[in-house]
Amino acid sequence: MNKLLVIVNPTAGRGRARREWPRQAAALRAAGLTVEVVQTRRPGEAVDIAERAALEYEAVVAAGGDGTVHEVANGLLRAGTGAALGVLPLGSGDDFAKMLPPGDPVERIARRTVRPMDAGRIRAGGVTRYFSNGMDIGFGAHGSRNFRKVPPLLTGLGAYLGALALTLLRYPIHAVRLQLDDEAPFAVTTVMTAVMNGRSFGGSFHVCPDALADDGELDLLIVEGLGRLAILGLVPKIMRGAHGGDPRLRLTRARRVLIESDAPLLVEADGEIAFVDARRLEIEVLPGGLPVLA
Protein backbone atom coordinates (compact mmCIF):
# COMPACT_ATOMS: atom_id res chain seq x y z
CA MET A 1 0.00 0.00 0.00
CA ASN A 2 2.68 2.42 -1.12
CA LYS A 3 0.38 4.95 -2.74
CA LEU A 4 -2.82 6.49 -1.45
CA LEU A 5 -5.32 8.76 -3.14
CA VAL A 6 -7.05 11.31 -0.92
CA ILE A 7 -10.36 12.68 -2.19
CA VAL A 8 -11.10 15.98 -0.44
CA ASN A 9 -14.56 17.49 -0.40
CA PRO A 10 -13.85 21.13 0.53
CA THR A 11 -17.53 21.88 1.24
CA ALA A 12 -17.92 19.08 3.81
CA GLY A 13 -18.81 20.11 7.34
CA ARG A 14 -20.13 23.42 6.03
CA GLY A 15 -16.59 24.42 5.08
CA ARG A 16 -14.81 22.64 7.92
CA ALA A 17 -12.95 20.42 5.44
CA ARG A 18 -11.63 23.43 3.53
CA ARG A 19 -10.35 25.00 6.76
CA GLU A 20 -8.79 21.87 8.22
CA TRP A 21 -7.41 20.14 5.15
CA PRO A 22 -4.01 21.94 5.13
CA ARG A 23 -3.34 20.71 8.68
CA GLN A 24 -4.42 17.17 7.78
CA ALA A 25 -2.23 17.21 4.67
CA ALA A 26 0.78 18.19 6.79
CA ALA A 27 -0.02 15.39 9.26
CA LEU A 28 -0.16 12.83 6.44
CA ARG A 29 3.25 13.97 5.19
CA ALA A 30 4.67 13.90 8.72
CA ALA A 31 3.46 10.31 9.05
CA GLY A 32 5.61 9.39 6.04
CA LEU A 33 2.68 8.74 3.71
CA THR A 34 2.93 9.31 -0.01
CA VAL A 35 -0.42 10.63 -1.14
CA GLU A 36 -1.97 12.10 -4.21
CA VAL A 37 -4.83 14.53 -3.71
CA VAL A 38 -7.88 15.49 -5.72
CA GLN A 39 -10.56 17.94 -4.62
CA THR A 40 -14.16 17.51 -5.69
CA ARG A 41 -16.04 20.32 -7.36
CA ARG A 42 -19.60 18.96 -7.51
CA PRO A 43 -21.88 16.47 -5.74
CA GLY A 44 -21.41 12.89 -6.92
CA GLU A 45 -17.98 13.47 -8.41
CA ALA A 46 -16.20 11.41 -5.74
CA VAL A 47 -18.07 8.28 -6.85
CA ASP A 48 -16.52 8.37 -10.31
CA ILE A 49 -13.09 9.37 -9.01
CA ALA A 50 -13.04 6.52 -6.48
CA GLU A 51 -14.28 3.96 -9.01
CA ARG A 52 -11.43 4.82 -11.38
CA ALA A 53 -8.90 5.07 -8.56
CA ALA A 54 -9.76 1.57 -7.32
CA LEU A 55 -8.05 0.19 -10.44
CA GLU A 56 -4.75 1.90 -9.53
CA TYR A 57 -4.63 2.50 -5.77
CA GLU A 58 -4.82 -0.02 -2.97
CA ALA A 59 -6.57 2.52 -0.74
CA VAL A 60 -8.64 5.66 -1.30
CA VAL A 61 -9.14 8.12 1.57
CA ALA A 62 -12.33 10.15 1.93
CA ALA A 63 -11.53 13.53 3.50
CA GLY A 64 -14.91 14.97 4.39
CA GLY A 65 -18.13 13.94 6.08
CA ASP A 66 -20.48 11.01 5.81
CA GLY A 67 -21.59 12.13 2.37
CA THR A 68 -18.00 12.04 1.13
CA VAL A 69 -17.51 8.60 2.69
CA HIS A 70 -20.75 7.53 1.01
CA GLU A 71 -19.57 8.60 -2.42
CA VAL A 72 -16.10 7.08 -2.09
CA ALA A 73 -17.53 3.81 -0.74
CA ASN A 74 -19.98 3.65 -3.64
CA GLY A 75 -17.14 4.08 -6.13
CA LEU A 76 -15.00 1.41 -4.47
CA LEU A 77 -17.87 -1.06 -4.21
CA ARG A 78 -18.82 -0.48 -7.84
CA ALA A 79 -15.26 -1.18 -8.90
CA GLY A 80 -15.09 -4.36 -6.84
CA THR A 81 -11.28 -4.48 -6.78
CA GLY A 82 -10.96 -4.76 -3.00
CA ALA A 83 -9.34 -1.33 -2.64
CA ALA A 84 -9.63 -0.15 0.96
CA LEU A 85 -11.48 2.91 2.25
CA GLY A 86 -9.67 5.37 4.51
CA VAL A 87 -11.46 8.12 6.41
CA LEU A 88 -10.37 11.60 7.49
CA PRO A 89 -13.52 12.81 9.30
CA LEU A 90 -14.01 16.48 8.46
CA GLY A 91 -17.80 16.65 8.30
CA SER A 92 -20.69 17.71 10.49
CA GLY A 93 -21.72 14.35 11.91
CA ASP A 94 -18.99 11.88 10.92
CA ASP A 95 -21.12 8.92 12.00
CA PHE A 96 -19.21 6.34 9.97
CA ALA A 97 -15.94 7.38 11.63
CA LYS A 98 -17.50 6.62 15.03
CA MET A 99 -17.45 2.92 14.10
CA LEU A 100 -13.68 2.93 13.69
CA PRO A 101 -11.21 2.28 16.52
CA PRO A 102 -10.56 5.35 18.69
CA GLY A 103 -7.49 7.42 18.04
CA ASP A 104 -5.99 9.80 15.53
CA PRO A 105 -7.39 9.28 12.00
CA VAL A 106 -4.00 9.89 10.37
CA GLU A 107 -2.44 7.22 12.58
CA ARG A 108 -5.20 4.80 11.55
CA ILE A 109 -4.38 5.43 7.91
CA ALA A 110 -0.64 5.20 8.51
CA ARG A 111 -1.01 1.79 10.18
CA ARG A 112 -2.45 0.49 6.90
CA THR A 113 -4.34 -2.21 8.76
CA VAL A 114 -7.34 -3.32 6.72
CA ARG A 115 -10.51 -4.35 8.56
CA PRO A 116 -13.40 -5.94 6.63
CA MET A 117 -16.60 -4.07 7.50
CA ASP A 118 -20.13 -4.65 6.36
CA ALA A 119 -21.89 -2.45 3.83
CA GLY A 120 -25.49 -2.17 2.73
CA ARG A 121 -26.85 -2.40 -0.80
CA ILE A 122 -30.11 -0.84 -1.98
CA ARG A 123 -31.79 -1.77 -5.25
CA ALA A 124 -34.69 0.35 -6.48
CA GLY A 125 -36.06 0.83 -9.97
CA GLY A 126 -33.09 -0.87 -11.60
CA VAL A 127 -30.57 1.36 -9.78
CA THR A 128 -28.10 0.11 -7.17
CA ARG A 129 -26.72 2.28 -4.37
CA TYR A 130 -24.58 1.32 -1.40
CA PHE A 131 -24.40 2.70 2.12
CA SER A 132 -21.68 2.46 4.71
CA ASN A 133 -23.51 3.83 7.76
CA GLY A 134 -27.26 3.66 7.18
CA MET A 135 -30.37 4.61 5.22
CA ASP A 136 -33.94 5.51 6.04
CA ILE A 137 -37.34 6.58 4.79
CA GLY A 138 -39.61 9.10 6.41
CA PHE A 139 -38.56 11.63 9.01
CA GLY A 140 -34.81 11.10 8.71
CA ALA A 141 -34.83 11.32 4.92
CA HIS A 142 -36.77 14.58 4.98
CA GLY A 143 -34.51 15.86 7.75
CA SER A 144 -31.51 15.14 5.55
CA ARG A 145 -33.05 17.16 2.73
CA ASN A 146 -33.94 19.99 5.11
CA PHE A 147 -30.38 20.06 6.46
CA ARG A 148 -29.40 21.79 3.23
CA LYS A 149 -31.88 24.58 3.99
CA VAL A 150 -30.39 25.40 7.39
CA PRO A 151 -28.44 28.71 7.41
CA PRO A 152 -24.70 28.03 7.01
CA LEU A 153 -23.84 29.88 10.22
CA LEU A 154 -25.32 26.93 12.11
CA THR A 155 -22.89 24.02 12.37
CA GLY A 156 -22.62 20.69 14.17
CA LEU A 157 -25.53 19.77 16.43
CA GLY A 158 -27.09 23.18 15.94
CA ALA A 159 -27.46 22.55 12.21
CA TYR A 160 -29.06 19.15 12.80
CA LEU A 161 -31.47 20.61 15.35
CA GLY A 162 -32.35 23.28 12.81
CA ALA A 163 -33.13 20.56 10.27
CA LEU A 164 -35.21 18.78 12.90
CA ALA A 165 -37.26 21.92 13.48
CA LEU A 166 -37.86 22.36 9.75
CA THR A 167 -38.90 18.73 9.39
CA LEU A 168 -41.40 18.98 12.24
CA LEU A 169 -43.27 21.59 10.20
CA ARG A 170 -44.03 19.02 7.52
CA TYR A 171 -43.15 15.35 7.44
CA PRO A 172 -44.73 12.23 5.92
CA ILE A 173 -46.26 9.20 7.57
CA HIS A 174 -45.89 6.22 5.25
CA ALA A 175 -48.05 3.14 4.91
CA VAL A 176 -45.57 0.48 3.81
CA ARG A 177 -45.14 -3.26 3.63
CA LEU A 178 -42.02 -4.69 5.22
CA GLN A 179 -40.38 -8.08 4.92
CA LEU A 180 -37.37 -9.08 7.01
CA ASP A 181 -35.35 -12.02 5.68
CA ASP A 182 -37.75 -14.91 5.01
CA GLU A 183 -40.38 -13.85 7.52
CA ALA A 184 -43.94 -13.12 6.44
CA PRO A 185 -44.46 -9.57 5.12
CA PHE A 186 -46.34 -7.17 7.40
CA ALA A 187 -47.95 -3.76 7.00
CA VAL A 188 -46.90 -0.82 9.13
CA THR A 189 -47.67 2.87 9.31
CA THR A 190 -44.34 4.52 10.02
CA VAL A 191 -42.99 8.00 10.55
CA MET A 192 -39.47 6.63 10.06
CA THR A 193 -37.88 3.30 9.24
CA ALA A 194 -34.09 3.23 9.40
CA VAL A 195 -31.86 0.38 8.24
CA MET A 196 -28.45 0.80 9.83
CA ASN A 197 -24.96 -0.59 9.61
CA GLY A 198 -23.76 1.96 12.16
CA ARG A 199 -25.21 3.18 15.42
CA SER A 200 -26.11 6.80 14.73
CA PHE A 201 -26.94 9.39 12.13
CA GLY A 202 -27.04 13.16 12.23
CA GLY A 203 -24.08 13.15 14.56
CA SER A 204 -26.09 12.78 17.76
CA PHE A 205 -29.08 10.55 17.03
CA HIS A 206 -28.30 7.01 18.25
CA VAL A 207 -31.03 5.26 16.29
CA CYS A 208 -29.57 1.75 16.64
CA PRO A 209 -27.24 1.99 19.65
CA ASP A 210 -26.29 -1.70 19.67
CA ALA A 211 -25.40 -1.97 15.98
CA LEU A 212 -22.08 -3.51 14.98
CA ALA A 213 -20.51 -2.80 11.61
CA ASP A 214 -18.99 -6.24 11.18
CA ASP A 215 -21.65 -8.69 12.44
CA GLY A 216 -23.11 -9.56 9.04
CA GLU A 217 -26.49 -8.05 9.93
CA LEU A 218 -28.34 -4.77 9.54
CA ASP A 219 -30.08 -3.11 12.50
CA LEU A 220 -33.52 -1.58 12.06
CA LEU A 221 -35.48 1.08 13.87
CA ILE A 222 -39.16 1.11 12.91
CA VAL A 223 -41.12 4.00 14.44
CA GLU A 224 -44.89 3.98 14.17
CA GLY A 225 -46.81 6.98 12.84
CA LEU A 226 -46.52 9.71 15.47
CA GLY A 227 -47.62 13.32 15.90
CA ARG A 228 -45.29 16.23 16.56
CA LEU A 229 -45.52 16.16 20.35
CA ALA A 230 -44.81 12.43 20.45
CA ILE A 231 -41.79 12.90 18.18
CA LEU A 232 -40.47 15.72 20.37
CA GLY A 233 -40.77 13.44 23.37
CA LEU A 234 -38.97 10.61 21.59
CA VAL A 235 -36.06 12.66 20.21
CA PRO A 236 -34.20 13.07 23.55
CA LYS A 237 -34.43 9.31 24.12
CA ILE A 238 -32.95 8.59 20.69
CA MET A 239 -30.17 11.13 21.29
CA ARG A 240 -29.25 9.19 24.44
CA GLY A 241 -29.79 5.81 22.79
CA ALA A 242 -32.35 5.09 25.53
CA HIS A 243 -35.39 4.35 23.37
CA GLY A 244 -35.21 0.56 23.55
CA GLY A 245 -38.42 -0.87 24.98
CA ASP A 246 -40.55 2.10 23.91
CA PRO A 247 -43.84 0.52 22.68
CA ARG A 248 -44.11 2.98 19.81
CA LEU A 249 -41.08 1.58 18.01
CA ARG A 250 -39.34 -1.66 17.16
CA LEU A 251 -35.63 -2.43 17.16
CA THR A 252 -34.65 -5.57 15.27
CA ARG A 253 -32.06 -7.08 12.93
CA ALA A 254 -32.11 -8.66 9.49
CA ARG A 255 -29.83 -9.56 6.61
CA ARG A 256 -32.38 -8.62 3.96
CA VAL A 257 -35.12 -5.99 4.09
CA LEU A 258 -37.87 -5.35 1.55
CA ILE A 259 -39.84 -2.09 1.74
CA GLU A 260 -42.81 -1.58 -0.57
CA SER A 261 -45.07 1.44 -0.83
CA ASP A 262 -47.92 2.50 -3.07
CA ALA A 263 -46.77 6.11 -2.73
CA PRO A 264 -43.30 7.36 -3.70
CA LEU A 265 -40.64 7.33 -0.98
CA LEU A 266 -37.81 9.76 -0.39
CA VAL A 267 -34.74 7.73 0.62
CA GLU A 268 -31.54 8.96 2.24
CA ALA A 269 -28.35 6.96 2.53
CA ASP A 270 -25.45 8.21 4.68
CA GLY A 271 -27.05 11.64 4.72
CA GLU A 272 -27.33 11.84 0.92
CA ILE A 273 -30.58 11.65 -1.01
CA ALA A 274 -30.37 8.30 -2.80
CA PHE A 275 -33.87 8.06 -4.33
CA VAL A 276 -36.73 10.54 -4.57
CA ASP A 277 -39.63 8.39 -5.74
CA ALA A 278 -38.87 4.78 -4.84
CA ARG A 279 -41.76 2.36 -4.33
CA ARG A 280 -39.83 -0.87 -3.82
CA LEU A 281 -36.54 -1.03 -1.94
CA GLU A 282 -34.54 -4.24 -1.81
CA ILE A 283 -31.92 -3.83 0.91
CA GLU A 284 -29.31 -6.37 1.95
CA VAL A 285 -26.10 -6.54 3.92
CA LEU A 286 -22.78 -7.30 2.25
CA PRO A 287 -20.91 -9.04 5.08
CA GLY A 288 -17.31 -7.84 5.20
CA GLY A 289 -17.83 -6.27 1.80
CA LEU A 290 -16.08 -2.96 2.53
CA PRO A 291 -12.35 -3.10 3.41
CA VAL A 292 -11.53 -0.15 5.67
CA LEU A 293 -8.23 1.23 6.98
CA ALA A 294 -8.78 0.83 10.69
Image (cartoon, rainbow, N blue to C red):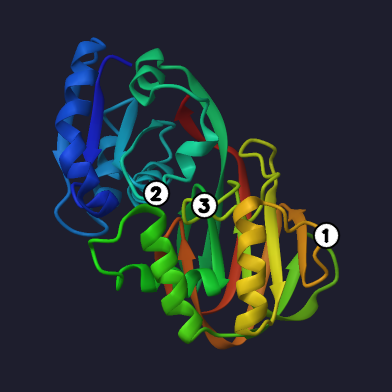
User: Front-most of 54 and 24?
Assistant: 24
Give the mark toward the camera: 2 or 3: 3
Residue type at tag 1 = Gly
Disc 2 designates what residue? 66
Disc 3 designates what residue? 204
Residue 158, x across and y down, in percent: 38, 59
Residue type at tag 2 = Asp
Residue type at tag 3 = Ser
The mark that comes first in sequence, 3 or 1, is 3
Disc 1 designates what residue? 245
User: Front-most of 290 and 90?
Assistant: 90
Can residue 171 be seen in the rendering of this structure? yes
User: Front-most of 290 and 229?
Assistant: 229
Mark 2 to mark 3 CA distance (whole Å): 13 Å
Mark 3 to mark 1 CA distance (whole Å): 20 Å
**Mark 3: which secondary structure?**
loop
Left or right for 123, reference 12:
right
User: Which label sits on residue 60?
Assistant: none
Q: Residue at left 61%, top 65%?
A: 235
Q: Residue at left 16%, top 43%?
A: 18
**Mark 1: which secondary structure?**
loop
Residue 16, x across and y down, in percent: 23, 45
